Image (cartoon, rainbow, N blue to C red):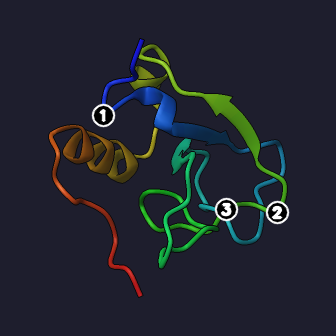
Amino acid sequence: MPRPAWSLHAYQLIEPDEQLDLFACREIRLHLVARQFELAGYADRTLCGGLLPAQPRWLAVDRLRLRDRRLCITCHGILQAQRRGERAGWPAP
């Protein structure tokens, strides 16, 4: 069975641990990351453009986790725009 063009499977969540990483978001937020990195893009960034922590804790994305209050609002907005087929995201180099 072919996979639809857009799918939650294309993304992963990173969850901060007890000690926030120096490079990650300074708030305790869940951030979305594209599972498949794009050429000419940043491979170490979340959808909202934040740097990934050194040792991220990866979570699968499902509809329940998309309702988590800790989910980054910007990441969620970009996900919804991509779902509608828009080329939303932070600027490429």
List x then y, in percent, for residue 84. 15, 39
Q: Which mark is residue 54?
A: 2
Element marked by disc 3: loop
Q: Which residue, given by chain and number where applicable, does mark 3 sit on? A: 52
* Amino acid, disc 3: Leu
* Residue at x 17% of width, y 45% of height: 85
Task: Tell me which numbered mark, 2 or 1, is placed earlier along the sequence.
Answer: 1
Judge whether 20 appears above or below 69 on screen: below
Task: Find the residue positioned furthest to the bottom.
Answer: 93
* Residue at x 61% of width, y 62% of height: 26
Q: Which residue, given by chain and number where applicable, does mark 1 sit on? A: 5
Q: Nearer the viewer, mark 3 or mark 1?
A: 1
- Side (left or right) of 28 relative to 83: right
Front residue of 5/59: it is 5
Q: CA distance from mark 2 to mark 3?
A: 6 Å
* Amino acid, disc 1: Ala
Element marked by disc 1: loop
- Side (left or right) of 64 relative to 60: left
Front residue of 19/43: it is 43
Judge whether 23 appears above or below 74 on screen: below
Q: Nearer the viewer, mark 2 or mark 1?
A: 1
Contact, CB < 8 Å: mark 3 with mark 1?
no
* Amino acid, disc 2: Ala
Contact, CB < 8 Å: mark 2 with mark 3?
yes
Q: Which mark is residue 75?
A: none
